[in-house]
Image (cartoon, coloured by chain):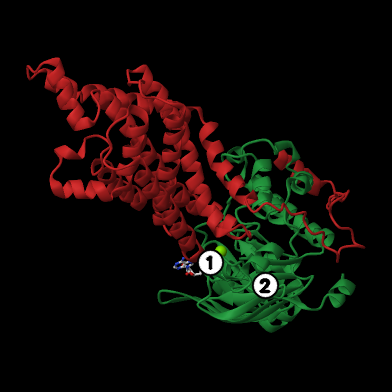
Chain colours: A green, B red
């Protein structure tokens, strides 16, 4: 993999001072970064950070308020059609037409790319097979489960043989097992298609396991960018997430007293615990939870 | 079932899909991304989008049934209940006098035939009005964004909405024609050219009206606003035309409105072609107005779609 990365070192996405302002809200605020060809690039940030807005601009759906971006060497504004031809998009929401079957949906998308049916028909079947939907190709999408719809969206995003695939929160709303399956598909696509992937996620953990490089965005601003290792160093150590029952008493103060713990944040029923040395801290944290009667 | 299958895959250590489909580039040739075979026809995407909408209509039995029953109800209600012949017959005039009055008002002695011709405008107007609605729902459900992320011509997206609505209008007009004849429309003046002519009229009027309603929906994601726009425009376009009543019974200011309403020219042409009515202008002028209406509005629609379809 590293060999491929070296040989494909050119930037496939170049973003310079990109901004999008809605009214007086800076959804994307003067963002600049590059994505190298062949890598999996993760865009991480909480709800409303500006991830979808950035993707919408890069996929030519939204006009930037200011700034410049180039995809596969094409200007996203002036050469929008070339950009569209070279990228695939798997949007955050489900976009397939519920009144049509899975196969009809993917063929329709192929038609919109101007791909001839003699090419798209076999390719659509291959892709549906790749995402394990071959037994449901002729069922209306309205009868699909969320996981199936997500996989159909993935297949639709690949129908034009994209060089760069945008995945906007590909695992949102999926159970842990389906999420693992989707990750597996993402790795397979990258391997088999030799594509560059640009994905967004809420979860740093998810980006950590999947991505070659990560950018952290919040309130429209790019906070950090780098490999997962670099980011962990700069954040300082590991993050341990503990999910507890709802309405359990807040024990942040106790956790913070543990020697190796640097920071504790509780949101709803999740603790995010930052430590210098995850391996040594986690047994201590587990002990604490046990002593507090959690296990 | 699929879900389970997908899950089983992780459980049984076979994480990566085993055989790579033949079309997928292998490790060796991965740098050579296969270029998709393109269809040369520029209408490829337009037809695919149009067909998507039409299929929703013709594969939905309830919608089909409604589109047959609706004209029956309208023709029955308006054509038979609003029967001006009976009004005049009640006045004690002789049959010859009655016919003279009817002829002078409606250009024909049968109000039902007069109204049947107007029904074509009615159906085209109501079908076209909803072409914009379909843009709104496509935006709402994300399909529009999906289409906009492909290189398909922006103009094709709005023209597909126009064409699907014209397609429906043509089919519904054919149904109306059959029903009107069954319910007693005069057929004495029917000719093959005349009937072909009214379908051209319906086509042109459908293009113009659907382009109008589609462009009003270009930026909207709100179906209630769209409904309000439909209601605001539809009834005036219908009543300030010669579809239901002859302009001669209207106040002069309204007659002027009728004369600038393109729907009137469609009705005028239809009545001349179908029942030999004396028109408000010549057939050539009717067609010229309709062609101009269709061309101008669809051009405006396409130009606006370049600018306003994406936000
Ligand atoms: N069309 C719009 N008009 C006004 N504000 C918008 C519009 N689209 C997005 N925003 C705002 O821009 C900000 C960024 O939204 P965006 O959808 O990019 O976030 P995100 O990072 O994708 O979040 P999520 O993880 O919830 O999907 C939000 O505050 C959102 O309310
Ligand atoms: Mg988002």
Image mark for residue A47: 1
Question: In the figure, residue B148 lies in which quadrant?
Answer: bottom right
For residue B34, above or below residue A196: above
Q: How many other residues sit within 10 Å of disc 2, few (<14), some (14-19) or many (≥20)?
A: many
Quadrant location of the N terminus of chain A in the rendered image: bottom right
Respond yes or no on whether mark 2 lies under 8 Å from ligand 1. Answer: no
Disc 1 from disc 2: Cα separation: 19 Å
Question: In the figure, residue B283 lies in which quadrant?
Answer: top left
Task: Between residue A80 and residue B253, name the one nearer to us.
Answer: B253
Q: Give residue A155's position: percent from left, percent from top.
A: 71, 51
Quadrant location of the C terminus of chain A in the rendered image: bottom right
Q: How many other residues sit within 10 Å of disc 1, few (<14), some (14-19) or many (≥20)?
A: few
Q: Give residue B32's position: percent from left, percent from top.
A: 85, 64
Q: Is A247 on the left-hand or right-hand side of A231?
A: left
Task: Between residue A100 and residue B90, name the one nearer to us.
Answer: B90
Disc 2: host chain: A
Question: In the figure, residue A3 lies in which quadrant?
Answer: bottom right
For residue B310, above or below residue B270: below
Q: Secondary structure at mark 1?
A: loop
Question: Which residue in the protein does label 2 denote?
Answer: A239
Q: Is B32 on the left-hand or right-hand side of A269?
A: right
Q: Give residue B29's position: percent from left, percent from top.
A: 90, 62
Tell me which residue sits at (42%, 47%) in the image.
B210
User: Which quadrant of the render holds ligand 2?
Assistant: bottom right
Disc 1: host chain: A
Q: Secondary structure at mark 2?
A: strand
Q: Are marks 1 and 2 on the same chain?
A: yes
Contact between marks 1 and 2 (CB within 8 A): the answer is no
Respond yes or no on whether mark 1 lies under 8 Å from ligand 1. Answer: yes
Observer able to see residue B309: no
Kindly give the residue lying farthest to the right in the view shown: B28
Q: Earlier in the sequence, mark 1 or mark 2?
A: 1
């Amino acid at each position: 993999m590293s060999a491929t990365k070296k040989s494909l070192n050119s930037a496939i996405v170049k973003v310079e001072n990109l901004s999008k302002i809605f009214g007086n809200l800076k959804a994307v605020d003067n963002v600049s970064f590059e994505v190298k060809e062949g890598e999996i690039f993760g865009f991480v940030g909480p709800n409303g950070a500006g991830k979808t807005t950035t993707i919408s601009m890069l996929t030519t759906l939204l006009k930037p308020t200011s700034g410049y971006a180039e995809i596969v060497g094409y200007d996203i504004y002036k050469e929008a059609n070339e950009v569209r031809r070279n990228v695939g998009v798997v949007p955050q929401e489900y976009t397939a037409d519920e009144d049509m079957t899975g196969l009809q949906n993917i063929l329709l998308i192929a038609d919109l790319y101007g791909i001839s049916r003699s090419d798209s028909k076999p390719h659509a079947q291959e892709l549906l097979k790749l995402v394990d939907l071959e037994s449901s190709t002729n069922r209306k999408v309205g009868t699909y489960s969320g996981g199936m719809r997500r996989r159909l969206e993935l297949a639709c995003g690949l129908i034009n043989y994209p060089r760069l695939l945008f995945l906007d929160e590909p695992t949102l709303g999926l159970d842990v097992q389906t999420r693992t399956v989707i990750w597996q598909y993402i790795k397979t696509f990258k391997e088999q298609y030799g594509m560059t992937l640009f994905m967004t996620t809420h979860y740093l953990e998810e980006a950590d396991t999947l991505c070659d490089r990560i950018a952290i965005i919040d309130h429209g601003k790019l906070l950090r960018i780098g490999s997962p290792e670099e980011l962990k160093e700069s954040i300082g150590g590991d993050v341990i997430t503990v999910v507890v029952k709802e309405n359990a008493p807040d024990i942040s103060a106790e956790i913070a007293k543990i020697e190796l713990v640097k920071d504790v944040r509780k949101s709803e029923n999740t603790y995010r615990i930052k430590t210098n040395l995850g391996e040594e801290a986690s047994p201590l944290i587990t002990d604490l939870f046990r002593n507090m009667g959690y296990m | 079932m699929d879900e389970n299958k997908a899950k089983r895959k992780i459980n049984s250590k076979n994480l990566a899909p085993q055989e790579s489909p033949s079309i997928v580039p292998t490790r060796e040739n991965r740098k050579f991304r296969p270029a998709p075979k393109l269809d040369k026809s520029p209408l490829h995407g337009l037809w695919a989008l149009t067909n998507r909408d039409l299929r929703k209509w013709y594969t939905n039995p309830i919608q089909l049934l409604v589109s047959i029953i609706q004209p029956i109800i309208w023709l029955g209600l308006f054509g038979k209940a609003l029967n001006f012949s009976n009004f005049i017959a009640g006045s004690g005039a002789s049959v010859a006098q009655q016919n003279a009055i009817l002829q002078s008002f409606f250009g024909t002695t049968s109000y039902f035939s007069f109204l049947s011709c107007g029904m074509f405008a009615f159906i085209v107007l109501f079908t076209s009005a909803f072409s914009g609605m379909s843009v709104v729902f496509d935006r709402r459900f994300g399909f529009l964004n999906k289409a906009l992320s492909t290189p398909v011509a922006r103009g094709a997206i709005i023209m597909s909405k126009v064409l699907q609505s014209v397609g429906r209008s043509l089919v519904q007009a054919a149904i109306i024609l059959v029903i009107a004849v069954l319910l007693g429309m005069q057929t004495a003046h029917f000719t093959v050219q005349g009937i072909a002519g009214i379908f051209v009229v319906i086509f042109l009027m459908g293009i113009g009206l659907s382009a109008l309603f589609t462009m009003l929906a270009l930026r909207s994601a709100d179906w209630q606003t769209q409904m309000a726009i439909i209601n605001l425009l539809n009834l005036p376009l219908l009543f300030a035309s010669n579809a239901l009543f002859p302009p001669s019974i209207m106040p002069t200011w309204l007659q002027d409105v009728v004369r600038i309403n393109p729907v009137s020219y469609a009705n005028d042409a239809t009545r001349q072609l179908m029942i030999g009515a004396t028109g408000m202008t010549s057939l050539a002028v009717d067609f010229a107005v309709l062609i101009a209406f269709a061309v101008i509005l669809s051009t405006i629609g396409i130009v606006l779609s370049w600018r306003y379809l994406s936000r």
